[in-house]
């Protein structure tokens, strides 16, 4: 089992979809939300994802393919 | 004078020890250094500061180090220039340039944060320091690591300006040029920071590192005669600098060091091709929408800024605003600052001048109020940005006749000395 702390940004109609639920069902991942904020058309979630390392990778790729912006919880560390 | 109580979560307020930690285990919020201000009130006086060294270390009671500073002893106390020519060009009465193009040793404000971070890394007994950088931070980390006798790793996107690459390599760090898009570089560095026990200055040392930027604000206030200007324009990448300048001014106010209240409006400057915080300010949205950076201001090309929300809060809370600058305006801004004040700033300086110009034209910065422009890095590092628009004025044969003809054909009028 591996853990990953991620910052996810959702825009447009992604905001209304149960994406984390779908993620957890499809890739057998546990998610634990620590902070989140949503308003019309945009939102973000800080969460810890846990699961099999390969499934975790695939799950993150799946999120990105759906248009979710996936970043480390520090967000941009390059500066 | 140890005045640090520890670290504290900016979101939920949970306390943490003063260790190399940067996020709250409960809410994942960022950690910040917590000081015992009551102990400083009365002992930290103007006189005590004025009798300190001519560097950032005159403010060491407000910096998170325990022992003596170990590196960067000549950092800070850069000139605050009364910019009369620039003021005239902008149609303003009172403009100052806080000139960190000449900061020591690596010619940007990043020397401030890194001097603190590497002193702290040595206190924590790290043997290796590292950073992920768009250039200025890389220069500063490599230089200070050399001075502190530490091994250093510097990760940079592979497409950066020559000046920033050479200005890093010369200090003999291990420079890792990462071929990948910006998000990939970012993710890699976060994973590297997780895996190795290094002092990653802008990751696990970040709470200490960021405090170094407060000195930019302290110096502005002290150099203005212990008062704050009506407006400050700050360039933003991750958004930390603007927050810390504000924090510095507010600390001075709280400690009774200012002549009046701090009523400064903080304004933010970003490039059009990467201005997510300014966009949020313009749209009144507390949620910052990440962007893919596309600008010549590579030092500000941070698409998903870690401190964006807090920067937004500082700007709005102070009654300030934000503006974008297009690539052309950035180049014009660099030229304007150089040709009016003799200061060659990097692209971030062009962004600041250009954004200030827009804010003045909109009336957000009234022409009869005082303004400080934060000029944070040196133009010799980003020559590519202006090179295409500059050319040699006259090209001539080595004769006086060729010179005179060339002057005439270019319409340059000068009066010859009277030889009679
Ligand atoms: C020259 C220059 N100015 C300003 C900034 C902005 O700093 P911050 O990330 O704290 O907003 C940077 C950051 O890299 C920089 O290099
Ligand atoms: Zn917390």
Image: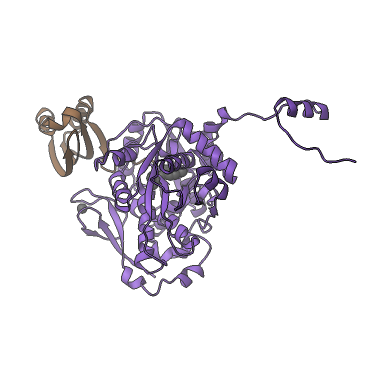
Q: How many marks?
A: 0
Q: Which chain is purple?
A: B
For this rendering, which residue is in front, B370 or A29? B370
- Left-right relation of B157 to B331: left
Q: Nearer the viewer, residue B416 or B19?
A: B416
Where on the image, by quarter, is ligand 1? top left
Does the image show residue B133? no
Q: Is residue A72 visible?
A: yes
- Give percent across and percent down for residue B250: 35, 61
- Give percent across and percent down for residue B413: 73, 33
Q: Which chain is brown?
A: A
Specify the color scheme: by chain
Depicted B1 relative to depicted B315: above or below: below
Furthest residue toward bottom: B42
**Residue nearest the viewer, comparing B342 with B144:** B342
Which quadrant would the C terminus of chain B be assigned to in this image?
A: top right
**Quarter of the figure with residue B258:** bottom left
Q: For this view, does B314 lie left or right of residue A57?
A: right
Q: Residue at x 38, y 59 (%)?
A: B248
Q: Position of residue B106 (x, y in %)?
A: 52, 47
- Looking at the rendering, in which quadrant would you find the N terminus of chain B? bottom left
| Residue B70 in the image: above or below residue B331 | below
Across and down, in percent, residue B229 comes to 43, 56
In this view, which residue lies farthest toward the right? B420
User: Residue, x 53% and y 55% (percent of image)?
Assistant: B78
């Amino acid at each position: 089992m591996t853990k990953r702390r991620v910052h996810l940004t959702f825009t447009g109609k992604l905001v209304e979809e149960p994406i984390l639920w779908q993620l957890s069902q499809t890739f057998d991942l546990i998610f634990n939300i620590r902070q989140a904020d949503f308003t019309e058309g945009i939102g973000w979630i800080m969460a810890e994802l846990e699961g099999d390392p390969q499934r975790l990778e695939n799950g993150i790729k799946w999120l990105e393919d759906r248009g979710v912006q996936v970043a480390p919880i520090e967000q941009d560390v390059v500066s | 004078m140890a005045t640090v109580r520890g670290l504290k979560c900016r979101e939920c307020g949970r306390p943490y020890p003063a260790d190399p930690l940067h996020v709250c285990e409960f809410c994942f919020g960022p950690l910040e250094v917590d000081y015992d201000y009551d102990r400083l009130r009365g002992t930290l006086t103007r006189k005590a500061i004025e009798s300190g060294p001519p560097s950032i270390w005159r403010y060491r009671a407000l910096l998170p180090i325990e022992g003596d500073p170990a590196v960067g002893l000549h950092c800070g106390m850069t000139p605050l220039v009364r910019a009369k020519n620039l003021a005239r060009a902008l149609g303003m009465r009172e403009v100052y340039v806080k000139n960190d193009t000449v900061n020591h040793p690596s010619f940007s404000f990043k020397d401030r944060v890194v001097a603190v971070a590497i002193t702290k890394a040595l206190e924590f007994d790290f043997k290796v320091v590292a950073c992920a950088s768009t250039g200025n931070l890389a220069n500063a980390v490599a230089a200070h690591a050399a001075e502190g006798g530490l091994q250093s790793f510097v990760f940079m996107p592979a497409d950066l300006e020559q000046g920033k690459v050479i200005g890093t390599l010369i200090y003999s760090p291990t420079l890792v040029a990462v071929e990948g898009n910006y998000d990939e570089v970012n993710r890699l560095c976060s994973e590297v920071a997780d895996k190795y026990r290094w002092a990653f200055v802008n990751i696990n040392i970040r709470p200490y590192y960021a405090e170094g930027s407060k000195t930019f604000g302290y110096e502005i206030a002290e150099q203005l005669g212990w008062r704050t200007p009506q407006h400050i324009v700050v360039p933003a990448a991750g958004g930390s600098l603007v927050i810390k300048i504000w924090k510095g001014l507010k600390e001075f106010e709280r400690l009774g060091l200012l002549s009046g209240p701090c009523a400064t409006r903080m304004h933010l400057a970003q490039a059009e091709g990467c201005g997510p915080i300014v966009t949020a300010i313009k749209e009144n949205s507390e949620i910052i929408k990440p962007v893919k950076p596309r600008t010549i201001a590579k030092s500000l090309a941070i698409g998903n800024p870690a401190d964006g929300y807090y920067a937004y809060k500082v700007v709005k809370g102070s009654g300030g605003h934000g503006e974008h600058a297009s690539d052309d305006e950035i180049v014009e801004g660099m030229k304007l600052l150089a040709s009016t004040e003799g200061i060659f700033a990097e692209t971030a300086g062009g962004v600041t001048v250009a954004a200030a110009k827009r804010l003045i034209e909109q009336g957000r910065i009234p022409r009869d109020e005082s303004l400080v422009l934060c000029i944070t890095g040196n133009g010799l590092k980003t020559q590519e940005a202006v090179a295409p628009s500059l050319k040699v004025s006259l090209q001539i044969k080595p004769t006086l006749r060729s010179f005179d003809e060339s002057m005439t054909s270019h319409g340059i009028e000068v009066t010859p000395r009277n030889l009679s």
